[in-house]
Amino acid sequence: MSGDDKMEAEALDWALRVGDPAFEDWDGFTRWLDESPAHARAYDTVAAAVADGAELIGSSAPANDDALPAIMATAPRRPRRAWLGGAIAASLMLVGGLWVWQAGSRDLYRIETLPGQVRTVALDAQTRVDMAGGTAMEFDRNDPRFARLKNGQALFTVRHDEARPFQVTVGEDTLVDVGTVFDVRRNGEDLSVAVSEGAVQFNPKAQDLRIAPGEVLRRHGKAGDYTLGRIAPARVGEWREGRVTFEDTPLRTVAADLARATGVAYAVAPGSADRKVSGSLLVAPLRADPAALGPLLGIEVREDAKRWMIGVP
Amino acid sequence: MPPSAPPSPSRSGLEATFLENRDKLLHFLRARGAGDAAEDLVQEVWLKISRSTPGPVAAPLSYLFRTADLLMIDRFRSARQSGTRERDWTQAHADEAGASPEPSAERRLSAAQEAGHVLSLLESLGPRVSAIFRRHRIDGMAQKQVAAELGISLSTVESDLRVAYRALAQWKERSDEA
C-alpha cells in the first residue's frame, strides 16, 4: 500500500467514525489531522463526497422502510448462543412447561427508541407493542409471542391465545397475558405493570400474582415490596396520546418518565428524589418550554449545564 | 469569541463549554485546514450555535466540534462547487458568447441524472449496504442503533458503510475528472 493509499484509507476511516452522531474522540481526530496538512484535505474529499451522495439520494427518493424487514430477515446473524447462553437457559427454565415452543433457542433482535420518540411494533395482525421514548426492547424472530423490556416503557395490546400465552420478560420477572392490554415500565430496577383489559399473571413460577383491569403493580428497586394500586383503565397507555399523569409519584420517576416522553434532559435535583407530586400534563408544550413544568406540578425547574433540574422549591 | 448579547439561560452550559474550549477548537480548525481563517471560523461556530440551539445539549463539547467539522466540510464543498461552476462557465463561454452561469434547465436535468446515477450506484452495492447507508446518513441514526435495528453486529454496519463511502469517493473522483 502506497503512502497515499494508506492516507486515503485512514481518511475514509475517520469520515466513517466522525460521521456517527455518537462520535466523541475529537482529540484523537485532531492528533491525526496534526500529523500532516494533507490529512485534512483527504478527509474533506471523502466527507464531502459522502455528503454530496447522501444529499442526492435523500432528495431523489424517500428512504424505503418497507425494505427493512426483508433486510432483517436476510441479514447474516452473529451466533447469539455464546453471549445469550445464560439468558436463554434462564428463560427456558422459567417458561418451561407453560407451552411447547417451536424453535430451539431465541433469535433476538433489538429495537430502541430515542427520548421523545414513539414507535409501534406489530408482532401479528392483532398483537402490537407501542414503545414510549427512550425504550429498549428485544423481540424474537422465531417467536412473535415473546418480548423483553430492557428499559423504558411499552404498552402491549395482545391477542390472547390460551395455547400460547404472550410472555414479557422484564429483568428477572416474567409477565404472562390472560387476554390483554397492559403497560409495563422499567426505570433501572423500578417496575410497574398496569392493566386496562384482560389480566396479567406476574411471575407465574414465583409470586404468581394476578393483575386485574384497573390495577397497577409497583415495585421500587429489585428487592422492594410490591404494592397493588388502582388506576383508571383509560389512563393506561395515555402517553401514546401525549399525556402523562402522576399520582403521588416520586420526583425521580417523574424526571425519568418526562425525559423519556419529551426528549428534554430532565433530572432530579439532589435531595428531591423521593418528594412526591401529583398532576396530569401534556407532553408537547414541555418540548417547547421545559421550564413550564414548574407551575404544573408546583416544583422548581432550574437549568444547569446540560440538564433541567427539577426539585422542591 | 464570546457573544456580545447576554446569553439566554438555556445556552449558558454550551457557552461555558465554548469559552473553556475555545483554544482547543481553534487548534482543531487550524488542523482541519482553516489556516488564517481559523479565528473567524471559531466565531462563526459560536454564531451558528447561538442562533440554532434550542436548549441543553447532551454532549456540548462534541456539539461544538461537530458544528466546526460540518462548517469545514461545507466550505470545502462550496469552494469545490464554485471551482466547477467557473470551469463550466468558461467552457460554455468559449463555445457560445453570452452564456449564463445560472442553473439552466439542462443543468437541473443533469443534476437529476446524477441523482439517478448515485442511487443506482448505491443499490448496486446490495440491499443491506444501501439500507444501512440510508438509515445512517439520511435518517441520521447512530451506527450502533442501525446495528440494533437490523439485528446485525456493529462491525458489519461499519464495514458496509465503508463499502458505500469508498464507492461514493470513487464516484466523486470520476465525476471531478470528467
Image (tube, coloured by chain):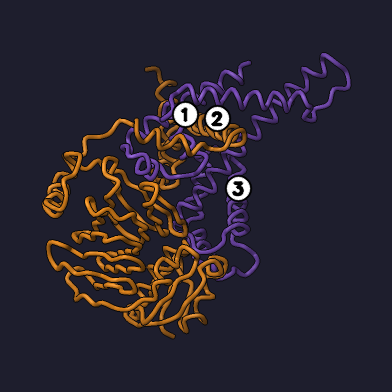
Label 2 close to label 1 by CB (< 8 Å): yes
Residue A193 left/right relative to A134:
left
For the residue pair A16 and A75, the one nearer the viewer reads as A75
* Picture coordinates of residue B68, whole percent (x, y): 54, 47
Q: Residue at coordinates 26% horizontally, 61% vertically from top-left? A: A178
What's the colour of chain A in the image? Answer: orange
- For the C terminus of chain A, the quadrant is bottom left
From the viewer's perspective, tell me whether residue A140 is left or right of residue A304.
left
Q: Amino acid at mark 1?
A: Tyr
Give the distance between the C-alpha atoms of the residues marked 3 and 1, in whole angstroms: 27 Å
Labels 2, 1: one chain: no
Residue at position x 43%, y 37% in the image: A68
- Extreme residue in the right direction: B98
Q: Nearer the viewer, residue A281 or B63?
A: A281
Mark 3 neighbour density, 10 Å: few (under 14) some (14–19) many (20 or more): many
Sequence order check: which comes first, mark 3 or mark 1?
A: 3
The secondary structure type at the circle numbered 3 is helix
Tell me the CA gap for discs 2 and 1.
8 Å
* Residue at the image point whose x is 59% and y is 69% from the top: B8
- Residue at the top extreme of this rendering: B95
**Can you identify the residue that label 2 sits on?**
A49
In front of the other: label 2 or label 3?
2
The residue singled out by tag 3 in the image is: B41
Residue highlighted by disc 1: B165
Q: CA distance from mark 2 to mark 3?
A: 22 Å
Tell us which disc is closer to us: 3 or 1.
1
